[in-house]
Image (cartoon, rainbow, N blue to C red):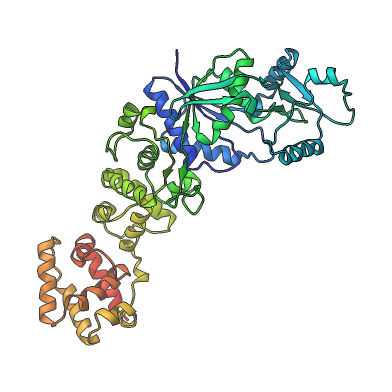
Amino acid sequence: MTIRTRFAPSPTGYLHLGGVRTALFSWAYAKKMNGEFILRIEDTDKSRSSKDAVEAIIDGLIWLGLNFDKGPFYQSKRINRYKNVIQSLLDKGLAYFCYSSNEELDQMRELQKKRGEKPRYTGLWRPENITQRKMTIPKNITPVVRFKNPDRGVISWNDQVKGKITINNSELDDLIIARRDGSPTYNFSVVVDDLDMEITHVIRGDDHINNTPRQINIFKALGAEIPVYAHLPMIHGPDGEKLSKRHGAVSILKYKEEGYLPEALVNYLARLGWGHGDSELFSIKEFINWFSFSGCSKSASRFDFEKLKWVNSNYLKNTSSDKLCLEINNRLLTKNVKLQGGPSLAVVCELLNDRMQTLEDLADGCAMFFLPIDQIIPLSKIFEIKEYKKFSYTNKEILINALTEFINNFPIQGDEESLTKHLKSILIKFELKMPQFAIPLRLILLGKSQTPSIVEVLGVLQKKIVCQRIMKALET
């Protein structure tokens, strides 16, 4: 038997962390079992579904490396199939037309609430009731179609994450499987899709547990084999509340924009609700080999931005120089940062990489090394900058002479030892403390007072760029 899992998002919004985690676990299990991972788009809600959302879902999965073996299949293109199955259930007496108006249903629920009962449909329009009560079919009401749920017995399944779950059929009412306009409902369409696509394992969030007994009963009515179910715990925010935008419940592609590496995000999401010993960092191959439902947690996990940044920073450190330079080059282009005439991007990335947590952080850090010559801060304005006044204020004439001497005798060798020796000689000759000279030097060379050590900065920029920028600052 070929193992088949599926990811079936609704294109009514963005692909968020919870959906990606579900897709990841479904994909990993299929890969581990040499099976197939299928993408299905549940787009029957025409008013809320959008083409842009579909594209974002597919782009997000591809970016993360969660390539699907089959699909995408669209529910909107399978409407005739659903209608045929509904008609088959009607013909077999396993479904029926319900003519209850919305007002009647509201009255039914209110009466049940007053009696302290669980609000549910009573089965009023079941065929046997029509006969026994000699009910007349109203002509002014378009009916829905309801599935005739078993009255007795229980529904049990061995959930791969939660364990054995049992629900009494008496707790379930007759589910609507076709709306008044003839369109199929979610719980029905899902069953037909899983049946036709031969899905063997349904891996999804535990917010779907209440749907499972209804779907199992429909499977049984269709004489189909019931898939294995695994319901994953939800992802909460750091405060334990439902994940929201303020916690990070945004489009997965937003994380791409913010500079997270796909392999780092996959690693982090894998650890949300699953574990393999104390392993925190692992390759995708290791994750596939290690993945099992027994390693999944039964309780909700908490999303932690700081942990994600830590994971991402580790992956950044191990990213090849060529790949890193390509990523940063693309980001600098979008920021209109021109690299011509600047230092080696590879050298700048190497200097900053260990200090940064995301690609966006790294790109922002690199940008200051490519400061355009026309944006060099004139020395006259540097004296007005708060950081200079606070930490390094000194006589203007002394600073000009020190800077002039600094570039006139700048060592041809740009190694750390030569640069350190040259810098110390300037400090001694002009009786300056390090901040008095280093801060204005940073402001001139990079436009910022907070940078890596001044010796590291000088080593990256080297003599030509250092002299050009200092000379430009001294012009005014």
* Residue 35 locus on image (x, y percent): 43, 20
* Residue 64 locus on image (x, y percent): 42, 37
Q: Quadrant of residue 271?
A: top left
* Residue 300 locus on image (x, y percent): 44, 41
Residue 15 or 51: which is nearer the viewer?
15
Is 399 situated above or below 337? Answer: below
Q: Is residue 70 rendered to the left or right of residue 271?
A: right
Is 8 situated above or below 466? Answer: above
* Residue 4 locus on image (x, y percent): 47, 21
Residue at x-position 10% and y-position 65%: 418
Q: Is residue 275 rendered to the left or right of residue 93?
A: left
* Residue lying at the far front of the rendered structure: 115
Residue 52 or 170: which is nearer the viewer?
170
Residue at x-position 61% and y-position 38%: 51
The C terminus - image quarter: bottom left
Residue at x-position 43% and y-position 46%: 256
